[in-house]
Amino acid sequence: MIAIIDYGLGNLGSVANMLKKIGARAVVTSTPEEIRGAAGLILPGVGHFDEGMRRLRERSLREILTERVVEAKTPVLGICLGIQLLARGSEEGNEPGLGWIGADVKRFSFPAAERLSVPHMGWNEVDIVDEGLFRGVPSTPARFYFVHSYHVVCDDPGSVAAWSTYGSRFTAAIHAGHIYGAQFHPEKSHKFGMAVLKNFAAVAGHAA
Amino acid sequence: MLRKRIIPSLLLERGRLVKTERFRKPKYVGDPINAVKIFNEKEVDELFLLDIGASREGKKPDFKLLEQIATEAFMPVCYGGGVRSPDDVQTLLKLGIEKVAINTAALRRISFLGELRDRFGAQCVVGVVDVKKRLLGGNAVHSQAGVDVPQKDPVRWAQRLVEAGAGEILLQSVDRDGTLLGLDSDLLRTFDGLLDVPLVAAGGASGVEDMRAAFRACRLSGIAVGARFVYQGPHRAVLISYLSAAELASLH
């Protein structure tokens, strides 16, 4: 069973819809019992960094998630705001992040001449450097749907699983041990995202 | 490289899929769930669903239908029509819809956009600007719902929507809607470089040639397409289609 963490932000329906489509057992939940019983955790989310951290705290989810991820080593996948919450903190706000990966979250900034609009919204191609989440992703080329104004910057480039480019190169996905993150929305990225969620479901299956 | 989005734009009316011409004469073109299934198989970049009935008749979004649609849609979906409260948006997000298009509600009270941005983020809020040619030349913001328009100038109104909380703008040409006459490049040129958020143009798209012309006229994030993706041939037989991979590649 995969637990999709409900902390009141984000596109929970979309993630649940796609997991159902690929035949993975999943539950949208915020209860400690269900989270403890899960073989994999998905932290989705869309919105403001501080709002995300505040809601995790208000619902007492921070402790239980830390217990499962840091102590029990349950595989976790952060999506969009979810990948950013895994970091130490964000330029978007003042709240400390979960701090499970050595990374900070920065806003896109461009030379004035480029005038790229923020958020970075739409389908972009990725360069895959770590197969983990991307096994079986069609390379025609591999593309995913992004909507974000901030991105993760890892201390160790070895934690980066895929890069993408918007103005300059940024982190599209991470993989550090049992911790995974996607800045894009796999649940809204057709067969490309379906392969990513299948891979995570398999990781969670093996961990069960 | 970030790809330009080519977005089928589907009109709903009382649970049916319809297509208009110049925002009038809605014609039945099929079952929306079936159409979304086909667009999903074609791996379209994104979908716009605009319920023209909900807006006109003052109804709530048809959440039941939208839930069925969302389970078939593994691409981003933006919904518009009858969205009047943050709770409506919360319900849509729970169903698996990621963005809401706001038109009449913003004409009535622009601060609504800020309320949505603060709760759900600007990426979720699409401001819609419907534009109609003036009899004596030039363009003006148009309200199909017949609401007073606080700012007639399309660019200024779009900028105000962005300041108020919209993270994306959908610019629709009423005069080109359903005509397959090509997008209004003159209108698009007046927008080029003047918005800090993604801009999607709609109205008149008929093929890759005029889409390319639109991308040349203005730095667009995408183009929304209605008639071209639901009709085929001179007699407008109903047929759901999308651009081929080669056609899409030729746009970049």
Image (cartoon, rainbow, N blue to C red):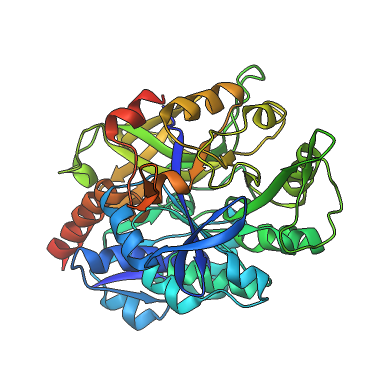
Q: Nearer the viewer, residue A145 or A53?
A: A145
Q: Position of residue B20 (x, y in %)?
A: 54, 56
Q: Residue at x 77, y 51 (%)?
A: B164
Which residue corresponds to the image point at 67% horizontal and 70% vertical from the top-left?
B56
Quarter that holds the N terminus of chain A = bottom left
Residue at 34% x, 38% y: name it.
B243
**What percent of the width, then of the height, locates residue A163?**
36, 32
Label count reads 0
Q: Residue furthest top?
A: A113
Image quadrant containing the C terminus of chain A? bottom left
Q: Is residue A19 above or below residue A93?
A: below
Across and down, in percent, residue A106 comes to: 56, 37
**Residue lying furthest front in this view?**
B235
* Left or right side of A191 for B121: right
Whether residue A183 is visible, yes or no, is no
Q: Residue at x 62, y 32 (%)?
A: B184
**Quarter of the image holding residue A118?**
top right
Image coordinates of residue A81 in percent, x first then y, are 49, 53
Q: Is residue B145 left or right of residue B21?
A: right
- Left or right: A41, with B157 as reference point: left
The reply to whether residue A145 is visible in this rendering is: yes
